[in-house]
Amino acid sequence: MPRTTLRQLNGFDDTPAKLADSTLVLIDYQNTYTTGVMELDGWQAALDATAQLLARARQEGAKVIHVINDGGEGTPYDIRAEIGQIHPSVAPVDGEPVVVKKAPNAFVGTDLDEHVDAAGNSDLVIAGFMTNMCVAFTAQGAFLRGNRPTVVADASATRALPVAGTELDARQVHYSALATIADLYGVVVPSQKGIS
């Protein structure tokens, strides 16, 4: 018997966003996640997928918003140091705002809502680091404020995590987070090919 999602029970639209009619929100593609204590499994493949998604969004005229996490000086999230900078392969260009956050939901305590509203698109395409943290909570935040998020799975990544006396590998954590999003908060597509 096929599983029913909360989205289906509520009659929400599961059609993926159209990139040209959406705002692309790229979350925490910082050097933080490419080396050292916070290095993610599969970060290079996810960055490559994101670079393709970003190039396509720019070509199609989609609005692009970058989000970074500021953990303060001396942390792996120090945006004043190279470790906290956005990776060069997906760095912003002139006219693309950068929102600085301190909470997993990028709408909390930031002006992301103003940038999203100014872009004028209800649909958001979201991808980033880490799937189970800032991607999931920002998708939830977008949903709760009335936006319609579509999350791109292969452009996001995370790491292995311990829980309840066992360890989940990064793939399990990644897909568990995507399942939470897809159950209620948004549409999940395997790759940008799932977005028209």
Image (tube, grey):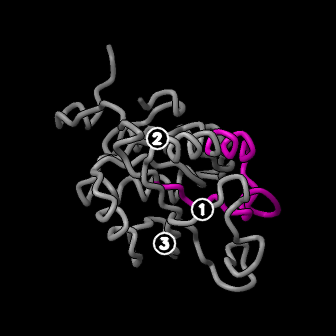
Residue 163, horizontal then vertical, whole percent: 60, 52
Pointer 3 local density, CA inside 10 Å: few below 14, some 14–19, many at least 20: some
Pointer 1 local density, CA inside 10 Å: few below 14, some 14–19, many at least 20: few
Specify the quadrant of the image occupied by residue 6: top left
The kind of residue tagged 3 is: Ala
Given residues 40 and 100, the one toward you in this image is: 100
- N-terminal label among 1 and 3: 1
- The quarter of the rendered structure image containing the C terminus is top left
The kind of residue tagged 1 is: Val
Question: Disc number at residue 103?
Answer: 3
Disc 2, SS: helix
Q: Is residue 95 magenta?
A: no
Mark 1 and mark 2 in contact (Cβ < 8 Å)?
no
Q: Is residue 34 magenta?
A: yes
Q: Residue at x 77, y 56 (%)?
A: 34
Given residues 172 and 67, the one toward you in this image is: 67
- In this picture, which residue range is highlighted in magenta? 25-50
Disc 1, SS: loop
Q: Is residue 63 left or right of residue 113?
A: right
Specify the quadrant of the image occupied by residue 173: top right
Return the residue found at the far right: 36
- N-terminal label among 3 and 2: 2
Q: Is residue 132 left or right of residue 187?
A: right
How far apart marks 1 and 3 lie (CA) works out to 24 Å
Pointer 2 local density, CA inside 10 Å: few below 14, some 14–19, many at least 20: few
Question: Disc number at residue 60?
Answer: 2
Disc 3, SS: loop
- N-terminal label among 2 and 1: 2
Question: Disc number at residue 93?
Answer: 1
Image height of 9 relative to 125, above or below? above
How far apart marks 2 and 1 lie (CA) works out to 15 Å
Image height of 121 relative to 104, above or below? above
